[in-house]
Image (cartoon, grey):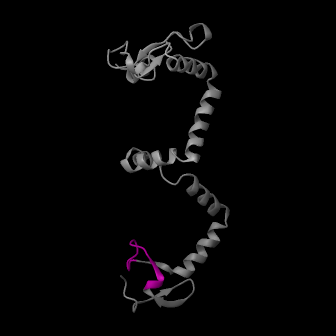
């Protein structure tokens, strides 16, 4: 902790003040900001009213962390727990539902086909993909693939696949 008996000059208000009245700043030779806390607060308040200050503030609210930092947090145990807790709240459920609704609106044929297969599995007319083996690699399947497309004539033409083979079949991943 800084010695409160040390005095420093503030060039803005032109007063001598105790060193504790200055923010810490390791880049400065004495380890403290050049302005006192009061002057800094006033200057920062004035800056936030300028167009550039408003834009900076809006950017900080919109992008609180870089993509890389956010991705790292999302993959961490703490991030996964936090997201799981959020998804269980009413707001989290609504946001997830909105994302699904957007996808359904953008892909009506795919949504109709997925719901048809889901309905067949639910009614017992088709086995769940978990009870089948992947047609590509023989491992346990996790989902169905509409290999003939999503139109009404081929809506029930599906094959059980694992996630890796499904990505290859959809040309999302190309192995060389």
Q: Position of residue 163 (x, y in %)?
A: 40, 24
Query: Quarter-wise, where is residue 12 in the image?
Result: bottom right
Q: Nearer the viewer, residue 98 or 130?
A: 130
At 61% from the left and 20% from the top, the residue drawn is 112
Q: Residue furthest top?
A: 153
Q: Is residue 174 visible?
A: no
* Left or right of 112, for residue 170: left
Residue 137 position, x and y percent, is 33, 15
Q: Quadrant of the N terminus?
A: bottom left
Q: Image point 60% across, 12% down: which residue? A: 151
- From the viewer's perspective, is 147 left or right of 135? right
Name the residue: 60% across, 42% down: 94
Q: Tell me, yes or no, whether the highlighted magenta stretch contains residue 26.
A: yes
Q: Is residue 16 visible?
A: yes
Q: Which residues are magenta?
A: 20-31
Quarter holding the C terminus is top left
Q: Residue furthest front?
A: 123
Q: Is residue 71 above or below residue 139?
A: below
């Amino acid at each position: 902790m800084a010695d409160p008996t040390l005095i420093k000059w503030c060039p803005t208000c032109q007063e001598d003040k105790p060193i504790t009245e200055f923010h810490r700043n390791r880049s400065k030779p004495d380890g403290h900001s050049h302005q006192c806390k009061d002057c800094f607060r006033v200057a920062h308040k004035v800056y936030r009213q300028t167009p550039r200050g408003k834009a900076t503030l809006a950017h900080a609210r919109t992008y609180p962390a870089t993509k890389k930092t956010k991705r790292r947090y999302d993959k961490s145990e703490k991030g996964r727990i936090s997201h799981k807790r959020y998804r269980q709240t009413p707001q989290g459920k609504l946001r997830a539902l909105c994302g699904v609704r957007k996808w359904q609106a953008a892909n009506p044929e795919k949504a109709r086909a997925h719901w048809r297969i889901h309905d067949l599995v639910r009614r017992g007319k088709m086995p769940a993909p978990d009870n089948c083996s992947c047609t590509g690699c023989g491992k346990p399947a996790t989902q169905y693939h509409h290999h003939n497309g999503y139109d009404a004539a081929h809506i029930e033409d599906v094959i059980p696949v694992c996630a890796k083979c499904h990505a290859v079949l959809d040309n999302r991943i190309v192995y060389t």
